[in-house]
Image (spheres, rainbow, N blue to C red):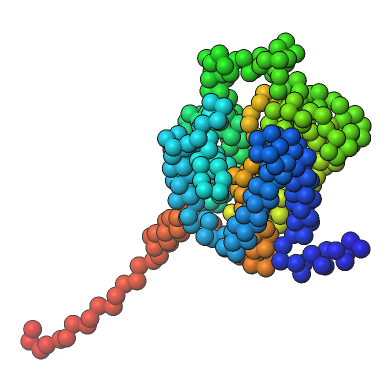
Amino acid sequence: MSTSLKQQQQTWPTDFWLIGLLAILLVIGLTMVFSSSVAISELRFNDPSHYLIRQFLAVGLGLIAGYIVFKIPLDFWEQHRGKLFIFGIVLLVAVLIFGREINGSKRWLHLVVMNFQPSEFMKLVIVIFMAGYLDRHLSAVKESFEAVIRLALPFGIMAVLLLMEPDYGSTLVIAVIITGMLLIAGAPWRYFVLTVLPMVSILVALVATSEYRMARISSFLDPWQDPFGTGYQLTQALIASGSGNWLGSGLGNSVQKMLYLPDAHTDFLFSIYAEEFGFFGVILLMLLYLALLYRLFRIGHKALQANHFFGAMISYGIGIWIILQAAINIGVNLGAFPTKGLTLPFMSYGGSSMLLLSIAMALVLRVDYESRFLPKEAKAPEDSDSEDDDQQEATQAKKNTKRRPRVRKPRAKRSSVAGS
């Protein structure tokens, strides 16, 4: 059976295991968006299915965008990665000027059909940009810290714009994506300390100098100290997660979604899921995300074997993005991390997240397609190496020229003239 599945997989244009995992997560996500948003939809719009319909539209838009992206060769993204990065910076500036403010943060641009979050777009852009940079400067990244320092200016500008929104969660996710891709590409471990420690120090300083952020940290450390104030959301989330026991209360039987837990269909959807499906349901969901990570990293490994280094880095980067964001969201719901405002991938309500994650998955499927059917030849040595080789050959040629014996030209015979 295993051999038959492997043979069948070779005939598919994409990885059907990855598509199956995504389909399962989407079905669970749509079900939980409907279940967790019934009360708030009824209260706000007098329609219990309002958020479900909008999430369906986001999924449909994501599938259309994903199909278009799947048809575009990887070379296109590698050639235009700089333009994508500049466009992302422009969006981050635009959201600070024209953005919609919600709960003290300017993170959303109001479009006709949805609120668009540029930070989600920036996560995808960073993966593409880093993949192209590593593909071109791999040897330099492995040998010289200067190649890593070159990234400080563009990423520093991006980080400042994100912190001005403020969006600390996305800043942290992007920093870990960059570091993870560097380490997977073969950069020394000391670069991890030199890149992450400054970012962490800045975040700690920003938290320490703000009373509002310090209050959030205090409520995270001890939410029961003020259960009806700063710790209200977390205490309600913990009550929901603990109420699930082993098998859960059953689909649709959550109590906390009845206007007790704020943002139950967005950032805290996991708590409602844990209440309705219990401990075993939570374990199943975590296994689904781990299986998704395995497929993404496996596609990256296959791309390396097919000499698609750019595509491999895309797969690895997207894998880091999804598993990290899922881990942070679950950790926030369980009280392990402070509230970050990060969605649970493919499950939480949010049009921007669904759209960009769908495009990201389409890119990975394109990587898988080109690795199977359009493998590349092994790359020649990089320009710097080839220049060194040419210089060595020229030096050797000069030495050989010096050692070459002289060949004397035959002298012309003098003509003897009588009487001269």
Q: Residue at x 88, y 66 (%)?
A: 4
Above or below, 88 against 414 in this view is above
With respect to residue 75, does 267 lie above or below? above
Q: Is residue 122 above or below residue 230?
A: below
- Residue 377 placed where, x, y %? 61, 65
Q: Position of residue 11 (x, y in %)?
A: 76, 69
Q: Quadrant of the C terminus?
A: bottom left
Q: Give whichever of 170, 201 is nearer the camera.
A: 170
The reply, left or right, for residue 171 in relation to residue 249 is left
Is 99 left, or right, of 224 in this rendering? left
Name the residue: 62% across, 59% down. 64
Residue 107 is situated, as x and y percent measured from the top left of the image, at 53, 35
Which of 418 and 322 lies nearest the eye of the viewer?
322
Q: Is residue 392 visible?
A: no
Residue at image point 61% right, 39% down? 177
Q: Is residue 139 left or right of residue 420?
A: right
Q: Nearer the viewer, residue 368 or 226?
A: 226
Furthest-left residue in view? 419
Q: Residue at x 75, y 38 (%)?
A: 38
